[in-house]
Amino acid sequence: MCGLVATYNLDKTVFDKSFERIKFRGKDAHSELAITSKLRFGHARLAINGLGLQGKQPMRSYCKRYVIVFNGEIYNFRSLSKRYLGTDYQSDTRVFVEFVSKFGISKSLEYFDGPYAFVLYDNLESKLFFARDVFGEKPLYYLLGENSLHISSSFLSFDDSKPFSSEVDFLNTGRLSQSKNTVGGLSSVKPGKLYSYSGNQITISDFSSTLVRPLERNFLFSTIFEEQVRRISEADVPCGLLLSGGVDSTSVAVALKNCEVDISTFTLAFDDPRIDESHKAIRVANALGFKSNIVNFDDSRVEEYFVEYISQMDQPIGDQAGLPFYILAKEAAKSVKVVLTGDGGDEKFAGYEMYSLYNRLNFLPGSKFLYSILGRLGITDVNSVCKLLLSVAGDELFRYKVFTSNPYAYQRVNYLYSDSLFPNLQFSNEEEYFSKAQCFDFDFNLPEGLLVKTDRLTMVNSIEARTPFLSRRYSSEMCDSEKRNLYGKQLIRKYIASYFSGSDSFNTPKQGFISPVYCWLNGGLRNRLFELLASDGDTQRSEHYKKLFFSLKPDSFKACQALWFYIVLQSWLQINKRCL
């Protein structure tokens, strides 16, 4: 993966400052090119495929019409090169730009499968194009001026721009919302959208639903998955696997074994046995014959870890797994340059507990009658209705604490049921419900949360993360009979059963990648938290978080999460000397 920057009709000093701030994303080579008197491209390269000059950027097409800066990977570039270009290019960027030369930009995007962001200039039409992949794995931001345009891979590249997210947003969700673009301000390029810039006007078209389908379809999940893992594991540099021992990363490990790919695994271990699951990952690695590397998270060094972590981030990340993930990626980078992950498995195959919980809300006995009564009483607020539904839905729903512990829960419900709850509450069938629930995850949860963490914390350690589950091929090529079993990870559990059929480890409730925030806040990070509270200019807010801290208990997930969002945000603002 790499970093890129492009400026149009801006001073060279703006370009230089912006370019300097994205160089951490690629430490192998830094190159820039003045394409016209007003347009300039910069590229920071992390070389993975085509290690020599064949992959150097900015890159011109052989016909000289196009110039590109590209960040990411086209997983199917080798097959595309041979089938459609009649040659064997070793650089995916070369395949990208030559594909555009032959088919045009809109048609080309229908063929590419993988994580990417790019800026492309058409010399003939004097037009600039830029886009991100359909899942939003790679970042790209832009700032449209009165007669200028600034594009970059990093949030920090932009000075004096209006924010697209506020401190309040972050303190509520732990994320910088990419959906709240401000007029005349900094915006995040939306996944699966092609932006065209000409005459200081931007037009946007959608390519997220188009993917050229092969002549043959109706493949089994195992066939597509293993081919995808085989493609993704191909690199001109050493490759590893981040293995948690859960269903998703274990399935990637099984696919690697079936593809006869020898790989090293990397697993995080905690001191606290209540949250440490490294033994599961060790068991998986041993069963498959992979070398297992255990990375111990030393709680006594948490303040040292935290300061380093915050200083390396180009934007605040509220995910509590961020700090441990950073340490894991840092250690993995000492021996590999590419890591495979299980990211996207829960979203693609509806693995979260919330899927079944929301489904139960919708199909509660007598729910239609209950909704009609609430409507007559004038209770139409989504949040109030869902709280009431939870109160009558039984202890199981309360035990998960979905609506009190997950900051995106209310947003998810609003997304599913629109502004007016009752006309849209009843779905015709379970498949329709799941489909819309997944759309929320792909529109918000992945590009604003999980993928931000994975991209930023691997790139800052100069390694590339690859995600086999985030492929457009599952929906376009999988046989119809298996598509009906996508939900609840039935296909994935069945896939790994041949190796672990006698184990019940994969049938226990999902724990996820959690961290001992309560211990950190009462231990190595306590002084830092109170220093931030003392220097907070908002006295009312400071007092609120003090009270929250003194009411903390080991199982106070919501309070721990709120305090974690606060300490991450305030530390990041302090180090970067800027505001949101």
Image: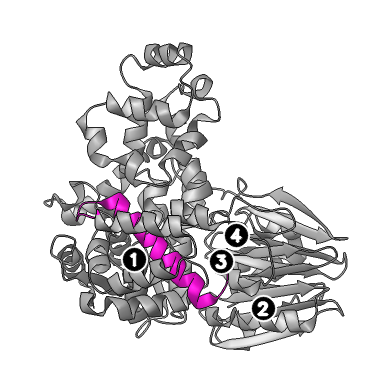
- Where, quadrant-wise, is the C terminus in this rendering? bottom right
Query: What residue does disc 4 label?
Result: 112
Query: What residue does disc 2 label?
Result: 18
Query: What residue does disc 3 label?
Result: 74
Q: Position of residue 386 (x, y in %)?
A: 38, 29
Which segment is the magenta one? 551-579
Residue closer to the observer: 460 or 526: 526
Amino acid at circle 4: Phe
Residue placed at 43% from the left, 47% from the top? 219
- Residue 575 in the magenta stretch? The answer is yes
Q: Is residue 566 left or right of residue 508?
A: right
Upstream in the sequence, badge 4 or badge 2?
2
Residue 158 visible = yes
Residue placed at 62% from the left, 87% from the top? 30
Callout 4 environment at 10 Å: few (<14), some (14 to 19), or many (20+)? many
Mark 1 to mark 3 CA distance (whole Å): 20 Å
Mark 3 to mark 4 CA distance (whole Å): 6 Å
The dominant secondary structure in magenta is: helix
- Asked whether the beta carbons under mark 3 and mark 2 sit within 8 Å of each other, the answer is no
Query: What residue does disc 1 label?
Result: 259
Mark 3 to mark 2 CA distance (whole Å): 26 Å
Residue placed at 36% from the left, 57% from the top? 545
- Asked whether the beta carbons under mark 2 and mark 1 sit within 8 Å of each other, the answer is no
Q: Quadrant of residue 469?
A: bottom left
Residue 239 visible = no
Element on which disc 4 rests: loop
Q: Position of residue 175 (x, y in %)?
A: 48, 57
